[in-house]
Image: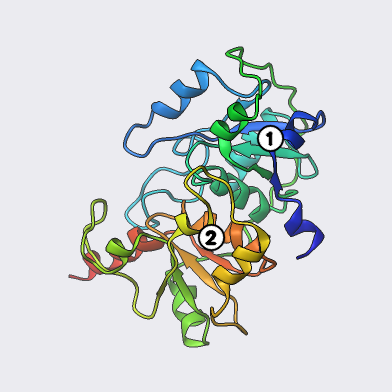
Amino acid sequence: MSRQSSAILISAGQLAQATDATIVDCRFVLGQPDAGREAYLRGHIPGAHYLDLEKDLSAPVARHGGRHPLPDARQLTARLASLGIHPGARVVAYDDARFAFAARFWWLLRALGYRPPELLDGGYAGWLAAGGAEEQAIPQPEPCAMPTVEPYRGVVDITALASLQSAGSPLLDSRDPARYAGLEEPLDPVAGHIPGALNLPWQAVSDAQGFLLDDARLSAHFAGLPEGRPRVVYCGSGVTACVNLFALARAGDESALLYAGSWSDWCSHLVADE
């Protein structure tokens, strides 16, 4: 495990001592777009700023690109600067959904060339269970200068995906087994999975309380995956795939790529071709 991969997870106890970190609350509920911010207003880690999955960490939905397209890099960089987050800043992010939304934030910053955020092990519930303080006050941000905007790295679209698969890159589907198998599809117009994809459900890298598997169990979990070519990870819309990408990075694989549009983008091309 590299030094960088070991520094992307933080415990509640460590966070309580981290006086130099900007804290970001990423809580969100799919299908209930106001629930995350409402939870933040009811109580959050002292000093935490709130970023919304659909307003801050995604672009508007278009014909292609999936249900949660990547946000415009310039707009996200400006939003980060408004919170005082520059490329070298130490940032800690958390949610209450087993890293589902905090990992999206982690991936976005890393893809823009920022210092990768540290994700709070156990999430908000773990913080409270450890005796962490809670407040309702909204912190006043201290903006920083707008840095140079970098393009996203480590991301592929449907065209690049085809080339990577042809070259032997393994494709990992992060959705639950029922959706992968096409037994159910609650969100997208087509059921099933991208041909050749292996199923690696995102929830499997943490326990029910939202604590990441320890290093030995993570290594065992990923053992047997094809090696030698960059792995490409997807989910339904490019959100929970980031949990697998985070766990892979923690286990030492920092070369894995995100198919950002994921299954919802793939479906949009299938429907368009009919």
In the displayed structure, 137 sits above or below 258; it is above
Judge the density around disc 1: few (<14), some (14-19), many (≥20) Cα neighbours within 10 Å: many
Foreground mark, 2 or 1, reads: 1
Task: From the viewer's perspective, tell me whether residue 142 is left or right of residue 273.
Answer: right
The quadrant of the picture occupied by the C terminus is bottom left
Picture residue at 37% right of the left edge, 46% below the top: 61
Which numbered disc, 2 or 1, marks the residue that appears first in the sequence? Answer: 1
In the picture, measured across the screen, residue 87 lies left or right of residue 186, that is right
Residue at the far left in the pictured view: 274
Tell me the SS state at disc 2. Answer: helix
Q: Are marks 2 and 1 in contact (CB under 8 Å)?
A: no
Q: Which quarter of the rendered picture does the N terminus lie within?
A: bottom right
| Mark 2 neighbour density, 10 Å: few (under 14) some (14–19) many (20 or more) | many
Image x and y of residue 70, in percent: 50, 50
Q: Nearer the viewer, residue 252 or 164?
A: 252
Kind of residue at disc 1: Ala
The three-letter amino acid code for the residue at tag 2 is: Asn
Q: Residue 192: where, in percent of width, then height?
A: 26, 68
Q: Is residue 70 above or below residue 97?
A: below
Q: Which residue is mark 1?
A: 12
Residue at 50%, 79% (x, y): give it.
Answer: 170
What residue is rendered at 75% in x and 29% in y? 16
Quarter where residue 45 is shown: top right
Asked if 192 appears above or below 129 in the picture, the reply is below
Q: Quadrant of residue 249?
A: bottom right
Image location (x, y in percent) of residue 242: 53, 55
